[in-house]
Image (spheres, grey):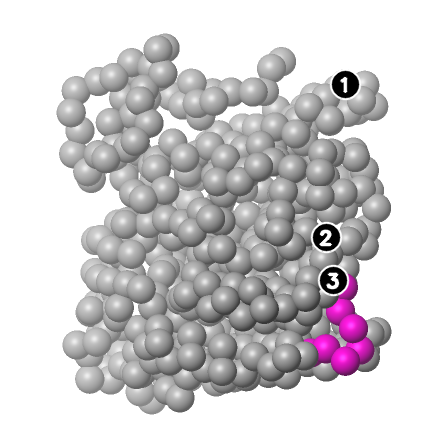
Amino acid sequence: MTWNRRNFLAFTGLGALATGVLANLKGCAEEPAANQVVVQQTTDNDDWAEVRNQFVLDQDYIHLAGLLITSHPTPVREAIDQYRQELDDNPAVYLEENNTRLEAETRQAAADYLGVQSNEVALTDSTTMGIALAIAGMQIRSDQEMLTARYDYYSTHESLRYKANRTGATMRKIPLYETIHQVSEDEIVDTSIGEVRSQTRLVTATWVHSSTGLKVPVRRIADRLEQINGAREESDRVLLLVDGVHGLGVEDATMNDLNCDFFMAGTHKWMFAPRGTGILWGNPRSQAAVSPTIPTFTRGAGWGGRMTPGGFKPFEHLWAMAEAFRFHQQIGRSRVSDRIHSLSRQLKEGLAQMPHITLYTPMEENLSAGIVCFDVDGFGPRQVVDRLRQQNIVASDTPYSPSHVRLTPGVYNTPEEMDRALSAIRDLG
Ligand SMILES: Cc1ncc(COP(=O)(O)O)c(C=O)c1O
């Protein structure tokens, strides 16, 4: 069986209706392939209903915690099943005959989505693994330091701590803003850059904070660092490492748009790829600064190949990643982004009108993405999550101190679902 399908609709056998619906998504840049059947004009709602139909999510629930772990759309689910079947039928032979090709195809699909060359992309198991690989393998001297935002994720802080213990380099945690209620891009950029010293080798950033939903202006920080680096020796350049997990699959941006040095993300959240998958991208200008920690298995091309950790893998998951990237491409990155921003805005605007709510996520589109965080007067975050769960609304509470309630709409949600969630929260007042 050949697995180099370009079109998840052809693959899923959804047929003319679905093919037409998705090919017709308004503003979708891609031309329908020759074998696609384009049906009559559809409404925007029909289009999103068709996207929703790709997921087997329990219809009795409103799913607003997709940032934790994803449900897979049809093409990803079917690819996992098919590859598993092939491996179960003839494991050694199927692997021997297909692994090199399928891994290369997966890296190519990821690279196409990221807007980079496939030899720049490593396939990992998670954001955590990508962060750890980049930091563990980074060249740093004992007289240099690593800057991290106070709000970066535990995996970043711990990887930096391990690195500091091994190398003698120091680690410094910095705040990015005075108060989330008045934060601005300028404040974040000026604060980060103001903390860079001659001995600073690494700056970490989290594209979208899972503690508040704040989106960090990565490009602006990267550009300021590039200016600073212009006057530095290669071994003193400040490297910008971005935990992009809550931006990838949400924001309409390529690696070129971000201009960072290293970017890592789990793809088992907003990207809808199989569980236990992720990517690590290294900007060609900085790849020499990071070398592998875990031996690779397939010796794929370039830095990305060497950085792809080996060992026998859940190959059916790794290979099926490609379908997730294609799924997003099929809908169109800007449409995905607009939809998620629109649903988030609806939530934030509704919450901002409720006197018993404190909203933490900025209203501005340039400072937020698909994560909405808030508190409810008189309730702890976990209590709110429990109360919503009683009404089959799946929220999460943030694993930070202080903790907040968190809602994260995805492309499978509807404006009506946002209204129902808002109504349930209003009733807590
Ligand atoms: C900002 C951030 N980074 C990393 C992670 C961990 O992601 P992974 O499970 O892919 O390691 C999370 C968890 O959701 C997170 O919120």
* Residue at mark 1: 97
Q: Nearer the viewer, mark 3 or mark 2?
A: 2
- The residue at 34%/66% (across/down) is 368
Q: Nearer the viewer, mark 1 or mark 3?
A: 3
How far across and down, in percent of the image, does residue 259 sit? 49, 55
Classify the position of the N terminus by image quarter: top right
How far across and down, in percent of the image, does residue 337 sit? 33, 49
Q: Is residue 311 magenta?
A: no
- The residue at 77%/59% (across/down) is 137
Classify the position of the C terminus by image quarter: bottom left
Q: In this picture, is 339 found above or below 148? A: above
* Residue at mark 2: 288
**Mark 2 close to ligand 1, CB under 8 Å:** no
Residue 278 as seen in the image, left or right of residue 366: right
310, 17: nearer the viewer: 310
Q: Badge 1, how many Cα within 10 Å: few under 14, some, many 20+?
A: few
Magenta range: 139-145
95, 230: nearer the viewer: 230
How far across and down, in percent of the image, does residue 83 sit? 65, 26
* Residue at mark 3: 138
